[in-house]
Amino acid sequence: MAAAASLLVPRRACQLIAKAKAAEVEVRASEQRASFALHCPGGGGVPAVGITTRLIEGVFPSYRHVVSGGYAGSVTLDLAETRAALRRATAVLGAGGSVQLRLNGSVELYASEYGSGEFRATLDRAVADCTPMVMAFNPGFLEAGLAVCAAGGGPGSRVLMELSSPTRPAVLHPVGDDHDDTYVLMPVTLNR
């Protein structure tokens, strides 16, 4: 009988486990380490791969209250349009720069870097259903969230970004996905 446990596993170990595409994963854990025996189809019960990793100490922050609802508004984004604009915006940013989503009836993606220039694009296929606000995000994390939502989506895929305020996390879901894929995106503080 399997016992329920909560483990913080490093990203690299998770990537290796996912890459193996095992039919079954057997997990054994102590306070500091976890071992994963990956059983492949047709392997006769003998593990094809074994991975042992050191666990991350601490408790994962409770995210359930973030993704449980109570949003003040939402923005529906066209993935292809938004990702293309984000690629152009990051061209003007240095390390540590942020992109802004300016929501005021329309949706504008904005980036500025002293000495490099400024980028501004209105996302014509986006629909904002929220009070006017400006939210800033790390462009790498925003792209990662869009990539998660794009996985499995075809041309014309859309993503729903649910919002509360410029200082609270945004939650991204692929439109029509019944919220099976959820990406929590923390905003960054705007330098005024």
Image (spheres, helix red, strand yellow):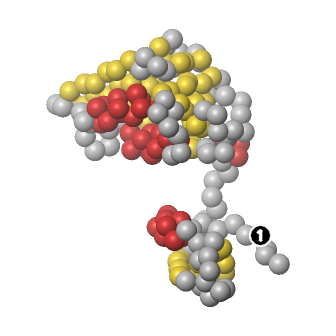
- Name the residue located 53 percent from the left edge and 15 percent from the top edge: 132
Q: Is residue 125 visible?
A: yes
User: Mark 1 sits on what residue?
Assistant: 4
Q: In the drawing, does residue 150 fall left or right of residue 45? A: left
Q: Position of residue 153 (x, y in %)?
A: 52, 40
Q: In the drawing, does residue 126 fall left or right of residue 36? A: left
- Taking the view exactly as shown, the residue that stands out farthest to the left is 115
- Taking the view exactly as shown, the residue that stands out farthest to the right is 1
Asked which secondary structure carries label 1, the reply is: loop
- Name the residue located 59 percent from the left edge and 77 percent from the top edge: 40
User: Which quadrant: the N terminus?
Assistant: bottom right
Q: Position of residue 163 (x, y in %)?
A: 59, 29
- Looking at the image, residue 130 lies above or below residue 57: above
- Looking at the image, residue 72 lies above or below residue 69: above
- Taking the view exactly as shown, the residue that stands out farthest to the front is 42
Q: Position of residue 171 (x, y in %)?
A: 59, 37
Looking at the rendered structure, the kind of residue marked 1 is: Ala
- Name the residue located 58 percent from the left edge and 30 percent from the top edge: 160
Viewer-nearest residue: 49 or 171:
49
In terms of image quadrants, where is residue 7? Answer: bottom right
Tally the marks.
Answer: 1
- Looking at the image, residue 34 lies above or below residue 177: below
- Name the residue located 61 percent from the left edge and 83 percent from the top edge: 43
Q: Is residue 187 visible?
A: no
Viewer-nearest residue: 99 or 173:
173
User: Which quadrant: the C terminus?
Assistant: top left
Disc 1 crowd rating (10 Å Cα; few below 14, some 14-19, many 20+) is few
Q: Position of residue 6 (x, y in %)?
A: 69, 66
In terms of image quadrants, where is residue 29? Answer: bottom right
In terms of image quadrants, where is residue 108? Answer: top left
